[in-house]
Amino acid sequence: MDREPVGVIEAKRDEEGQRITEHEVQTERYANETLKWRKAGLPLRFLFEATGQIIRFADGLAPLPRSRELFRFVQPRQLTEWLAAPSTFRGRLAAAMAYEDLEDFVACYRPKSRHQREPSERFRLYSYVELIARDMASLDVFWLKDDSLDSLAGLPRPEVLQQEIVDHLESALAAFRGVAASLPKSTNQPHND
């Protein structure tokens, strides 16, 4: 970006697709190499492994970096936005919740003495009868409102959220295709269960 390296793309032949995640170590090694054009000796942030069919991506700045499959390469303008952000999407999520945020729930839930549970201002108990009486026995918690959602200033831009959702769905679909491919082929015989 702007003639500065920000990532590594480790390209492999298509037949390496089944083992593409095994090459993540190699990509990380390249990202950490001592190169004269790297700023401050920091590792290159964006890590890609790719064949002609598969693209995997990891953001080295994430709290627990791990790769995920992408449908297409990230556009340079998206990388520019990520570089300008103070932290990653996962980092903002991890920083958004601390144990103190859950203390009221833990006090109400009483994991060691569940028969002595008492409602609190934010959490209450529902009996089986109350749950079943609800429309379609929904466990929706719409009545809980997160005031932090009133301000959109801390949220990523809509196109970033949209792309993350698309990436997650595509990754799930790819994983499901992998499972489906590993299942024995049907002989179109009806099952007699």
Image (cartoon, grey):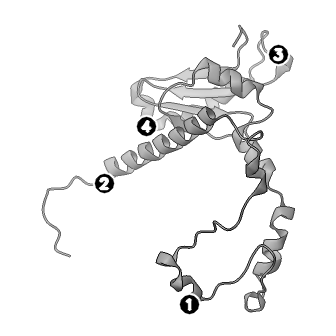
Mark 1 crowd level (few <14, some 14–19, many ≥20, 10 Å Cα): few
The earlier-in-sequence mark between 3 and 4 is 4
> Do labels 3 and 1 touch, CB within 8 Å?
no
Mark number for residue 183? 2
Is 153 displayed left or right of 69 in the figure?
Answer: right
The x and y percentages for residue 33 are 74, 20
Label 1, secondary structure: give it: helix
The x and y percentages for residue 138 are 53, 73
Q: Residue at x 78, y 91 (%)?
A: 116
Q: Check disc 4 and give the amino acid type.
A: Gln
Q: Quadrant of residue 106?
A: bottom right
Q: Residue at x 63, y 68 (%)?
A: 141
Q: Residue at x 71, y 33 (%)?
A: 60
Dot 4 corresponds to which residue? 18
Mark number for residue 39? 3
Mark 3 crowd level (few <14, some 14–19, many ≥20, 10 Å Cα): few
Mark 4 crowd level (few <14, some 14–19, many ≥20, 10 Å Cα): few
Q: Check disc 1 and give the amino acid type.
A: Val
> Do labels 4 and 1 touch, CB within 8 Å?
no
Question: Closer to us: mark 3 or mark 2?
Answer: 3
Question: Closer to us: mark 3 or mark 1?
Answer: 1
Q: CA distance from mark 2 to mark 1?
A: 42 Å
Dot 1 corresponds to which residue? 129
The earlier-in-sequence mark between 4 and 2 is 4
The C terminus - image quarter: bottom left
